[in-house]
Image (spheres, helix red, strand yellow):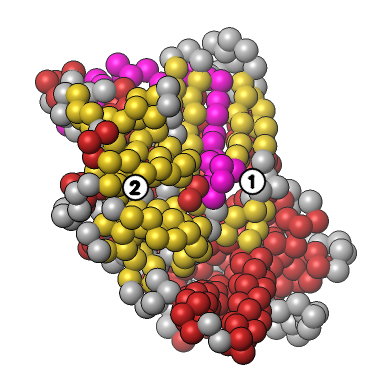
């Protein structure tokens, strides 16, 4: 629990800094709507964080301040006396952070709760400011923007390393060889250190749900437990930072939609938050043993909400019906509760994971439960890839999808119902001509075939020539150029661009 407490304190201190900045804005302009909303958001976030850590006093104060700010949000104006009080509240948060860091008792909250009652009566409080506590100089909070800059520079050095090694192979100079080896070793070490700085265990996110889940289950009167598996797996911090919201929505859905009330439960309710690493990707699943998804109900609800007409709905496959659950206007819940039912949770989870180059996978069996899986890369920046040529143009294919490669002449391919196949040992391997799918010419005759597997599908990608296998730095494509065939781009050792294929996009 110590590591989670440290993260909580660190985040609390950052929110206090933001809070003081916004309060200073409100002191000079008490009609700054954006600052009022931001202050409300900060206290709302601190309330949730404090709840998960079991800090009931801080949670109660933050919740009561939200109530005070409701009227100010509606009016678009905050009174000077309320601003003064919020400074006092910020001081309480600061003293609490210092107490937590020094493992001392938290300051009492009774006085500040009494002050809120006075504020509601219109009384003016005397404002005072205490000297802030100091932090240990041995610990420095680094903004992610600066760490990202350092990370990008390390990635550019990786590209420079590849170019240096290629140049050394061409010139074959002993002095250059020694310099290239030393530079390569140092750049690799630097890159590993920077990568390590960005990696966090998933428990950083997972453990925050334990207390929240327990309280919400009791509030709903449901007998259900939360089991956490795989929290020790480390992923890039940029992924950890955005996992909280989509996972919260998935767990809410499991609790509210999946797990039934005790009167109709077949067995004690159980929700499992599970992470599994698969090569260079991670799968995070929220699994429940509840009532499952009634696809007929999904079909009828889609028609009722105007998403489909009856003819379209009748021809949808099971996978397409599951996809409807991610539509922002869809919800199988007949009423909105404090937990879920607004129809936007799965849409948020789906769009968030899509922006990270991942997918939301849904499976369910009526009467047995449901499974919602976020499939994500461990890191968004560097991958091992096979470099190949197609019509003279280089492409990259992530190694974690590749099982084997072989040469074959086109005469060995067979066509059945317009699909090309190849007899590979005791298997009939479906072939995908990348030249046809990507719109390139491709040469005739002898071909290289890359056998890839995505989930349960094995296919052979027919290409012209395999060039190399190396580590590549992944750069995002412009949003206007997105395609299911590509997951990003990179720079090859000679400085030319390389498109990175996503084999899942080829069906």
Is residue 359 in sight in this rendering?
Answer: no
Q: Is residue 283 magenta?
A: yes
Which residue position is annotated with label 1? 206
How far from the left and from the top, in percent, is residue 256? Answer: 50, 29
Quadrant in which residue 498 is drawn: bottom left
SS category of the residue bearing label 1: helix
Quadrant in which residue 317 is drawn: top left
How far from the left and from the top, in percent, is residue 444? Answer: 19, 49
Distance from label 1 to label 2 (Cα)? Answer: 44 Å
Q: Is residue 52 magenta?
A: no
Vertical side of 36 occupied by 227: above or below: above
Location of the C terminus (image quadrant): top left
Q: Nearer the viewer, residue 396 or 173?
A: 173
Which residue position is annotated with label 2? 448
Query: How busy is the neighbourhood of tag 1: few (under 14 within 10 Å), some, or many (20 plus)?
Result: many
Which residue ends up furthest to the bottom in the rendered image?
175
How far from the left and from the top, in percent, is residue 151? Answer: 55, 74
Is residue 421 in sight in this rendering?
Answer: yes
Vertical side of 121 occupied by 491: above or below: below
Left or right of 272 in this view: 456: left
Which of disc 2 and disc 1 is earlier in sequence? 1
Query: How busy is the neighbourhood of tag 2: few (under 14 within 10 Å), some, or many (20 plus)?
Result: many
Q: Residue at x 64, y 46 (%)?
A: 206
Q: Nearer the viewer, residue 497 or 96?
A: 497
Q: Which mark is residue 235?
A: none
Magenta region: which residues? 277-306
Q: Residue at x 50, y 77 (%)?
A: 169
Q: Residue at x 44, y 17 (%)?
A: 365
């Amino acid at each position: 629990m110590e590591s989670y407490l440290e993260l909580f304190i660190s985040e609390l201190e950052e929110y206090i800094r933001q809070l003081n900045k916004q309060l200073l804005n409100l002191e000079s302009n008490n009609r700054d709507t954006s600052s009022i909303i931001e202050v409300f958001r900060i206290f709302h976030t601190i309330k949730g964080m404090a709840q998960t850590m079991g800090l009931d006093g801080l949670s109660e104060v933050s919740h009561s301040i939200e109530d005070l700010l409701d009227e100010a949000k509606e009016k678009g104006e905050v009174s000077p006396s309320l601003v003064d009080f919020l400074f006092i509240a910020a001081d309480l948060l600061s003293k609490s952070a210092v107490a937590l860091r020094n493992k001392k008792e938290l300051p009492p909250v009774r006085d500040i709760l009494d002050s809120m009652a006075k504020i509601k009566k219109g009384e003016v409080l005397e404002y005072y400011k205490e000297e802030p506590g100091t932090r240990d100089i041995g610990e420095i909070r680094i903004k992610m923007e600066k760490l990202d800059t350092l990370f990008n520079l390390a990635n550019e050095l990786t590209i420079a390393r590849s170019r240096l090694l290629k140049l050394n192979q061409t010139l074959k100079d002993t002095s250059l060889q020694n310099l290239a080896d030393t530079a390569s070793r140092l750049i690799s070490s630097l890159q590993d250190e920077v990568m390590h700085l960005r990696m966090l265990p998933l428990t950083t996110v997972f453990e925050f749900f334990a207390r929240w889940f327990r309280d919400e289950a009791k509030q709903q009167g449901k007998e259900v437990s939360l089991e956490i598996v795989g929290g020790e797996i480390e992923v890039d911090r940029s992924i950890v930072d955005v996992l909280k919201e989509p996972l919260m929505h998935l767990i809410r859905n499991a609790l509210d939609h999946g797990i039934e009330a005790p009167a109709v439960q077949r067995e004690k309710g159980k929700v499992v938050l599970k992470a599994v690493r698969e090569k260079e990707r991670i799968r995070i699943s929220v699994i429940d043993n509840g009532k499952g998804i009634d696809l007929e109900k999904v079909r009828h609800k889609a028609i009722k909400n105007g998403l489909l007409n009856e003819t379209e709905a009748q021809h949808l496959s099971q996978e397409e019906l599951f996809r409807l659950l991610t539509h922002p206007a869809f919800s199988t819940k007949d009423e909105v509760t404090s937990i879920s039912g607004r129809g936007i949770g799965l849409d948020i989870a789906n769009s968030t994971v899509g922006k990270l180059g991942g997918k939301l996978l849904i499976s369910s069996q009526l009467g047995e439960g449901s499974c919602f899986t976020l499939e994500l890369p461990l890191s968004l920046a560097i991958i091992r890839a096979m470099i190949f040529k197609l019509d003279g143009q280089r492409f990259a294919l992530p190694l974690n999808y590749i099982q084997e490669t072989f040469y074959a002449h086109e005469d060995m391919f067979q066509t059945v119902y317009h699909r090309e196949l190849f007899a590979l040992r005791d298997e009939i391997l479906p072939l995908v001509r990348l030249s046809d799918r990507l719109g390139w010419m491709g040469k005739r005759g002898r071909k290289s075939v890359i056998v890839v597997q995505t989930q349960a599908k094995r296919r052979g990608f027919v290409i012209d020539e395999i060039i190399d296998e190396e580590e590549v730095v992944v750069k995002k494509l412009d949003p206007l150029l997105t395609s299911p065939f590509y997951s990003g781009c990179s720079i090859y050792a000679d400085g030319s661009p390389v498109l990175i294929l996503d084999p899942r996009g080829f069906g």
